[in-house]
Amino acid sequence: MTATVLGAGAVVGVVPVARTTQWLKPMLAFSGAYLFALTITHLLPEALALLPAHPHRVGYWVLAGFFGQLLLEVLSQGIEHGHVHAPEAQERGQVPLLLLAALVVHSLLEGSILLKSQAGLVSENFYALVLGVALHHIPAAVALATLLRLRLGSPRRVWPWLGVFALASPIGLLFSNYVVLEQLLSTDAYAALLGFVAGTFLHVSTTILFETSPEHRLNWPKLGATLGGLLLALGVGS
């Protein structure tokens, strides 16, 4: 996950913006389809299996995650799905701290569901989930690196802040696996966490899929990327 963020940031420094934009939309479609399918086939079934007597509670947490992500994107300005807004004159030279904080919170939550020692679907599909998070981070990292370069100018000033984003998901993973693992597994907290993150994934992935075809016309590269992401998610979980 860290490598994908830093690698995507490096690409921004050497590839022209026009070329980056050209492959970013198919990449968004691919990652959005993968994330959506992964949520439906892995996260939601696992969350429901953890609370068989109270499945409606999972639904509440999914709704909380969906609308919580909607609020986060007010601060992040949609950078999770590749949005880059040109900075205004007074914003140049300033680090977008609120945007970065929202992105870090989102990434911490993503990392927190990756329990390697959990018996069940999530543990068995640990690397499928890691791949989903990594794929999702590529367009987000490209957008963040582009925005930081527009604001800060110097690439040297970009890397520390990009590094903060790159470390967020691994920190969430380490915290869940080594600090609060017993508390997560001995209560309903993990089911709630899975439901909440599933809600955020549903929001992000559906937004990506709708935005990649705003004109509602058949676009073969995007359609191929979408089907590729779907098939990969189904393949890694089979």
Image (cartoon, helix red, strand yellow):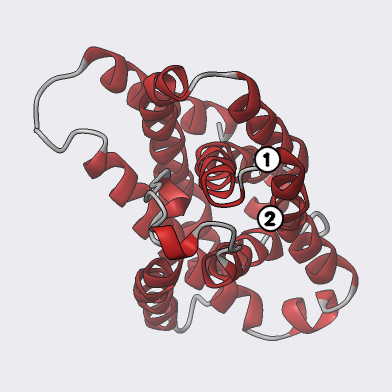
* Observer able to see residue 95: yes
Q: Residue at horizontal 41%, vertical 58%?
A: 89
Screen quadrant of the N terminus? top right
* Observer able to see residue 118: no
x and y percentages locating residue 115 in the rendered image:
76, 59
Q: Is residue 69 left or right of residue 121?
A: left
Q: Is residue 192 left or right of residue 190?
A: left
Closer to the camera in the image, 140 or 128: 140
Is the C-beta separation of discs 2 and 1 under 8 Å? yes
Residue denoted by label 2 = 165
Q: Residue placed farthest to the top in the image? A: 220
Marks 2 and 1, the one that precedes in the sequence: 1
SS for callout 2: helix
Closer to the camera in the image, 110 or 163: 163
Mark 2 to mark 1: distance in Å? Answer: 8 Å
Q: Which mark is residue 230?
A: none
> Mark 2: few, some, or many residues within 10 Å (few <14, many ≥20)?
many
Q: Which mark is residue 5?
A: 1
Q: Residue placed farthest to the left in the image? A: 216
Q: Residue at horizontal 88%, vertical 76%?
A: 179
x and y percentages locating residue 212 in the rendered image:
26, 35
| Count of marks overlaid on the render | 2
x and y percentages locating residue 222 in the rendered image:
29, 22
Q: Is residue 225 above or below residue 200?
A: above
> Mark 1: few, some, or many residues within 10 Å (few <14, many ≥20)?
many
x and y percentages locating residue 130 in the rendered image:
67, 43
Q: Residue at horizontal 9%, vertical 25%?
A: 217
Looking at numbered disc 1 in the image, what kind of residue is underneath it? Val
Looking at numbered disc 2 in the image, what kind of residue is underneath it? Phe
Screen quadrant of the C terminus? top right
